[in-house]
Image: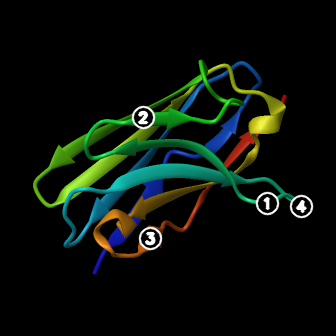
Amino acid sequence: QVQLVESGGGLVQPGGSLRLSCAASGRFFSPYRMAWYRQAPGKQREFVASITSFGLITYADSVRGRFTISGDNAKNTVTVFVEMNSLKFEDTAVYYCSLDLRMRGGTEYWGQGTQVTVSS
């Protein structure tokens, strides 16, 4: 059973920074893709950034240059981080982590979401 646990959300002023973490545990193997998505009130969920087990990194245009995604592999747990800098009001959303195993014919797993609020 795969589990994703997110942390690091909160309230921050415009121009500030936050770091989100997502720890994926359970039985899964490479190749895989871990990603962050976000959903603002009244809007559809949108892609933010992703990193694959072979090191390919992708960003949405709206966050490129401000957000940095990285990963860490430890025994039985893979953790992905997103460092968010120069935060804007429009970055306010619930941020979700996903573990995508469909490259191996598996499924995609989602975390519970963590709220990021950018407000003065």
Label 2 Cα neighbours within 10 Å, binned few <14 / some 14-19 / many ≥20 = some
Is 51 on the left-hand or right-hand side of 92? Answer: left
Which numbered disc covers residue 57? 2
Choose the circle earlier in sequence order: 1 or 2. Answer: 1
Choose the circle earlier in sequence order: 1 or 3. Answer: 1
Q: Secondary structure at mark 1?
A: loop
Q: Nearer the observer, disc 4 or disc 2?
A: 2
* Residue at 30% across, 36% down: 55
What type is the residue that disc 3 sits on? Glu
What type is the residue that disc 1 sits on? Gln
Q: Secondary structure at mark 2?
A: strand
Residue at which label 4 appears: 42
Residue 19, given in percent of the width and then of the height, sits at: 50, 35
Q: Secondary structure at mark 4?
A: loop
Residue 60 in the image: above or below residue 34? above
Residue at which label 3 appears: 108
Q: Secondary structure at mark 3?
A: strand
* Residue at 44% across, 70% down: 108
Which numbered disc covers residue 44? 1
Picture quadrant where residue 15 is located: top right
For the C terminus, which image quadrant? top right
Q: Farthest residue toward the right?
A: 42
